[in-house]
Image: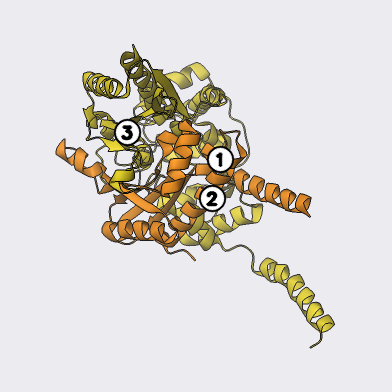
Amino acid sequence: MKQLIYTVFLLLFFTSHVQAENVMMVRTYDTFDVTLESVKQSLTDYGYKVAHVQKCDGGLGQFGFTTDAYRVVFFGKPDEVRYWSKKEPALIPYLPLKIAVFAEGDQVLVVSFNPEELGALFADREIKIQFSRWKNDIKSVLRDVSGQP
Amino acid sequence: MNIRETLAAMVLLVGLLPTAALSTGPDGLSLFKENCVVCHRPDGEGSIGLPLQKTKFKALSDDYLRKTIRNGRPGRLMPAFDSLSDSQVEAIIAYLRKWSGSQSAEFPAMIVKGDEVNGKRLFQGHCVNCHGEAGNGSGEGTGQSYSRERDFKVIPPAIGNAGFLASVSDNMLHDVITNGRQGTLMGAYGRLGLSPQDINDIIVYLRSLPTLQKVQEAENGKTPEPSIIVESPHDFETTVKNLKKALSGYNFRVFPDRHLEQGLFPEWEVNKKQLTVRYCNFNHLYAILKVEPRLGIGLPCRITVVENEEGKVLLIGMNMTLIAKLFNNNQLQDYAREFHERQLDIIEEVTF
């Protein structure tokens, strides 16, 4: 039975990895502010904490560059961030996790890395499983934000 | 209903499900929404992907569309949709035909013959300004930008791209160059002084190009390390101080300190020996966002100084060449290599 579960797990993991996109992205038709709030709310619903929101447009605007609204949402589960930053320092630059939200005229794009793609660079099976979970959660957040069923 | 009957009903139902799905076939509109809209927008106006003008479709063959979806554009953002089934690809094409009110253009299969040298001369005289040296694409980025100023409102396609060349037939290329593209900057060169043989020469030249993608794919074959980790010979505070000084020396603006765990734990619980030094050069940032507007997920630039339990002080940064690789964007890779080298120089200065 254990072997069967392991085989199914491997199959599922392999299948999702083969079909993985490097960058996960959705488009919304809400206003920028509504989309940003929706991202934050959805992250909270999936048990994540928003650490902070970086205003990239603010800095660009100060320097005289024209840009639509552009924010980066940093988020994580506190214990996971602490655990992984200690166990695998190479993950530190990717923690907390990030979702970029930027306007494009009257529409908004919401983008994230596919964590599984980064997980593929690590041999540790525990990291791969963690990255796979993050991928599924981020995918769910993007799906919720885009209003897809 | 007894257990046997219930089971029989379930088996029948499960058996019928695929039949029902087959009878209707994949839904082109749903597949278009799921796979194409995010880059091309629902109305086909274009975004990081090129606009899909309805008028353009009558000059495209289904074969070209099919191969474009399958091959993507290596190094130009569009992925190869190799996980879609044949029937799904056909459903998307059928939807595009219905949406644009067009039928497949037919081009007889033929390999044109011509003079590569003359083709190169003509390409450099007529095509390079928009399509770039060796057809790598001119201008910054791809598709069209809604808020960042670029050389072109819509970036002309990279016609030397391996994905494009593998998708387009010689005869379709001949037709495009001869008749231009309605609704775009592409002129009808058949009426602008090029003879049919001149156009053949250009096609032969395009087919002869050593595609940049091949070189970059070879580089991509090497698996980069996800991060740069360097041990500092200095204590934690000195390392942070040196890092900020070095970043200023490289014309970066350094943002206020932020601990890795800040915002996640109450202030008194935050590990103060994990300090993320965030920095930016807004001129560079703007230039890079023109090339890759999604780069925000790699921002802001940062190096984290960590003192671990053994008392070792480490400088840890993201390997931007790896990040660039994830975007399928050759222009971004050029910036990333430069950035990576600079980051290594900074870390070397800090740890000297």
- Left or right, A106 with reference to A85: left
Mark 2 touching mark 1, by CB under 8 A? no
The mark that comes first in sequence, 2 or 1, is 1
Q: Is residue B38 above or below residue A120?
A: below
> Could you tell me which secondary element the residue under label 2 belongs to?
helix
Q: Spot the residue most to the top.
A: B352
Query: Which quarter of the figure is the C terminus of chain B placed in?
Result: top left
Residue at point 50%, 26% (across, down): B225
The residue labelled by disc 2 is A133
The amino acid type found where label 2 is placed reads: Arg
Graded by Cα atoms within 10 Å as few (under 14), some (14 to 19) or many (20 or more), the crowding at tag 2 reads some
Mark 3 touching mark 2, by CB under 8 A? no
The residue labelled by disc 1 is A127
- Left or right, B325 with reference to B107: left
Mark 1 touching mark 3, by CB under 8 A? no
**Chain A tint as drawn:** orange
The residue labelled by disc 3 is B276
